[in-house]
Image (spheres, grey):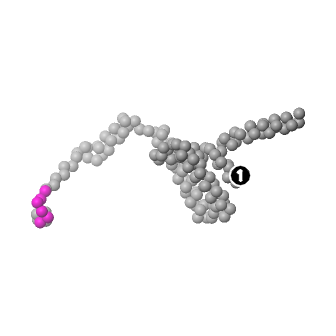
Amino acid sequence: MTLNKTRVWVLLAAFATAPSFAQNIAVVNGTPIPTSRADALVKQLVQEGQQDSPQLQQAVREELINREILMQEAAREGIAQRPDVKVQIAVAQQTVVLRALIENFVKNNTPTDADIKARYDQLVKQTGGGKEPHLHHILVDNEQQRRI
């Protein structure tokens, strides 16, 4: 009977930890790499024109594992604590946040065709009322005639 209880506890422990494994694509030296990070990178690559495929998924997985290994080495060497690196991290973070802000603004404030036409008409009035310049040119047979 004790042996059966042990098996039950082992199975329960396995089922309890299964969701945490499903949320990670890998664990590198005890540090999990979440599936959400892989999904975000795949989404970015697809937006850049790559085709989502099992090969891309595998390449992203390998890339994230390699990055984690290198990040652990960088942390061991204290790279992230260097003043020049801290400044670059702050600038990169600011860039990501501002890009998200701009994307959010554009998504929530997309102009209609009527808005675009109205703005176009306004700019035409400001720049001369729709008068188009008429450019003229004279064709000559050779370079000597052009200089006269």
Q: Nearer the viewer, residue 88 or 105?
A: 88
Q: Is residue 3 left or right of residue 146?
A: right
Magenta-colored segment: predominant secondary structure:
loop
SS for callout 1: loop
Q: Amino acid at mark 1?
A: Gly
The answer to whether residue 44 is magenta is: no
- Disc 1 marks which residue? 30
Q: Is residue 84 above or below residue 7?
A: below
**x and y percentages locating residue 19 in the rendered image:** 69, 39
Q: Is residue 24 visible?
A: yes
Q: Which residues are magenta?
A: 139-144
| Residue 99, image x, y percentages | 51, 48
134 vs 81, nearest the viewer: 81
In the displayed structure image, the side of residue 90 where residue 117 appears, left or right: left
Q: Was residue 141 drawn as part of the magenta stretch in this picture?
A: yes
The structure residue drawn at horizontal position 46% and vertical position 39%, both measured from the top left corner, is 109
Residue 103 visible (yes or no): no
Residue found at x 58% / y 57% = 90
